[in-house]
Amino acid sequence: MTLPAYNFAYLDEQTKRMIRRAILKGIAIPGYQVPFASREMPMPYGWGTGGVQVTAAILGPDDVLKVIDQGADDTTNAVSIRAFFAKTANVATTTKTADATIIQTRHRIPEERLQAHQTLVFQVPIPEPLRFLEPRETETRVMHGLEEYGLVHVKLYEDIAQHGHIATTYAYPVKVEGRYVMDPSPIPKFDNPKLDRSPALQLFGAGREKRIYALPPFTQVTSLDFEDHPFTVQTFNRPCALCNATGVYMDEVVTDDRGGRMFVCSDTDHCETRQAEGHAGPGLPQLGEHASSEQETTR
Amino acid sequence: MTDPILSVRGLEKRYGAFVGCTDVSFDVWPGEVVAIVGESGSGKTTLLNCISGRLERSAGEIRYRMRDGRFPDLADLSEAERRFLMRTDWGFVHQNPADGLRMRVSAGANVGERLMAVGERHYGEIRRTAGDWLSRVEIAAERIDDQPIAFSGGMRQRLQIARNLVTHPRLIFMDEPTGGLDVSVQARVLDLLRGLVTDLSLAVVIVTHDLAVARLLSQRMIVMKGGHIVEAGLTDRVLDDPHHAYTQLLVASIPES
Amino acid sequence: MYVAVKGGEAAIEKAHRLLADRRRGDRSVPALSLDQIAGQLSLAVDRVMAEGSLYDPELAAMAVRQSRGDLIEAIFLIRAYRTTLPRFGATRPVETGAMRIERRVSATYKDIPGGQLLGPTFDYTHRLIDPDMAGDHPVEPGARRDVSGDVAGDAAYPRVTDILNGEGLIEPDVASDAEPGDLTRDPTGFPAGRDLRLQALARGDEGFLLSLGYSTQRGYGRTHPFVGEVRIGLVDLEIDLPELGFAVAIGAIRVTECQMVSQFKGGGEDGPRFTRGYGLVFGQSERKAMSMSLVDRALRADEFDENRAAPAQDEEFVLSHCDNVEATGFVEHLKLPHYVDFQAELDLLRMLRREHAAASSETARQEAAE
């Protein structure tokens, strides 16, 4: 038995063309979920098969690829996907946001503002923002088609009635160019403002659910809210323990079993770059000092 | 008199070889309540579902007077226009409130949903309007955040009515709105309905097997049997002086009120 | 001390080395050969081929070995390989009427032309663990029936459903020249149509379909089924060669077919007749073929104007959840890090608790003041 030699970036060229057509359609109709014939990939569904197919379809030999998961380059699944493309496409890889031409991500948008020559590829588990309000695809497609989005606000209304706040903290729904309601993938809502009018092309791939959608550069992306309960993002009221950065998304790191916590940048490249530039944070918290609490501010 | 708001001509609905209703023609004028009565299997619910766009007709015309004065056949409207009508200009009150409510969503959001669907984006305003409507249907203000699952049958029905009326529709369809309620509760809901219909000068098409409900609410009534209209006229006339033998039988079978 | 999760690459490498070690197990025990797996665990191999939707016993045996016997993992390996294969063409529809029968039973007739053939079945074995299985005892060769008198083709083993159809008692299988869809090459939309449904069921998870089929028997979408016939055996694959102008046989595969004779329906011109549920699976798997035919019939509810309320009747539900490779991926992805989103939830929860505490103490203060 002879085992096959795989094509550049694994997928055959026919499949890539099919995916590119879906991407182009997605770019032409920002925020619209384009069905595509998702292939079975050599990694499990739910582990980035959509993002990997999109990346494979747009990747060229000269591209420089960065892969992050939770903002970090060294999380195991990011390592695994980066290794997959290094092996099947032999492309250069990087952890530097500024150096990458394609960034595949799960759950974060890098802190550093992306540039016009860059493409951000999101891995998406459930592309349908209405899915948990209406489980049927046949219904949700009609709702999108007829722009029937009242139900999304019913959910937000219920949050406020029950908790006093909109209780969605990630995968926070957005409206694209005043038309399609879109799931931005499970990024924290902290990252939502970065979607808006980004100079970079943003592509979203959902392998298991077989959908691709896109935000062309400089697309208007608005997070849904009420006039009297405007969209807000998380803020952390202390700087990164390692690089002293503020205004960034933090990981809370448990340092002991007595309530010790410290907060560090979720974006590892951002943090390391700042440390290399000489920034230093306060380091470990003193024993007994408790985690600060966060507050919300309007953006 | 003004023009009719709804006009039905030669309506027919077949299920394969079986005829649900046929040769149905009538008009509804603004502010008028028309009752469709008949026993189960007479085709009255089929008729209601056809004219409210919930069931595809087999033949005939159904025209509706839009707010801009146009009078198109519903079949000529796009799906988007039809759905917009359904959530703004029309209401539909189901016999079982669970069919018309979101049972696991608060009463406030149930009433507010239509407002949000047409673009209302001020939480406080939506909540205030929902509160007003709850009080109009006699639901206590402090129940605004409770889910209908915790409501009694009568309250659920009143909530369903409020949910339908919040966008100030001009035409309401009702399918046995008191059919699932205890007799003691029926009277209160009927009383409420009668008041609202008058205050808001709603046009209503109500399906009921209960002639007492028809007498209380409607100005005109249509009697159906075997998918056909057998008699139509002013409610008092039909009930007090039924012409058709079937209507006479129906009227005779209810106790004098 | 804070340790960043560094060295993911090294960790992965070491994990994979350990996996290979555990897979091989005790080195003093000879490694499993593919022949052993394909020959002695053939039903496992059949399942991998069926749900991997690739007929290649040797490759399936490799996958079973590579996956340490985790069949869904093996199916996944086969699928990921299958998707890279070029398509040369499609075979003609297989003629199961001309199957070289290894087993064939009908529950609807006591005897049928060609006879009932039990074949290699677990049925009627007493499920007692056999001490012989601990060793390698000699096994007698199976008794073979004489097939020299068999007439090739439909005449020898007519399908039970064809017999019923001869009397007009069952809905006919209508031949169609329409090109069937391809689940693996086109995005699925709903309603999907029976061609795509059958494709999805044929590669759907055996356990999921078994439970769904079972649920229809317990009243969640009853179909009043009778096994018209289950048959297992070899069928020839033929492919049209345009250059030659005729079809040539390119090989044979083993399949299991189930024709479920189900609830009669109708009126109209044709009068009432039985309806069909259909199952066809690579290899020997009656359980899967029967379950598939139950679910196929249940999914035809709309076609027969049946009330569609049970899970097995819900096309979108069944098709969206029957694929075990999709399901296992998404369930297992929950073990990937989610700490960014979890952090966002923590923040919100802390704020809500703070507000709750503030509100409670305010209430307590007021009550104390009264």
Image (cartoon, coloured by chain):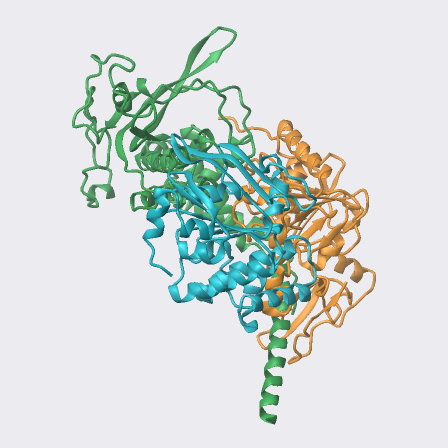
Chain colours: A orange, B cyan, C green
Residue lying at 63% horizontally and 41% vertically, measured from the top left: B80
| Left or right for C61, reference A278 | left
The residue under the point 65% across, 70% down is C1
Question: Residue B145 appears in which quarter of the rendering?
Answer: bottom right
Compared across the picture, whether B126 is left or right of C181 comes to right
B162 w.r.t. C100: above or below: below
Position of residue A88 relative to residue B234, above or below, is above
**Residue in the foreground of this view, choosing between C78 and C18:** C78
Outermost residue on the right side: it is: A277
Along the line of sight, the residue nearer the viewer: B137 or A193: B137
Quick one: A76 or A15, which is closer to the camera?
Answer: A15
Q: Quadrant of residue C122?
A: top left
On the question of residue A186 being in view, the answer is no
Give x and y (percent) for residue B118. Answer: 66, 52
Residue C330 appears in the picture as rendered: yes
- Of all residues, the one furthest to the bottom in this rendering is C369
Res C164 → quadrant: top left
Image point (71%, 39%), residue name = A29
x and y percent of residue A253 in the render? 64, 67
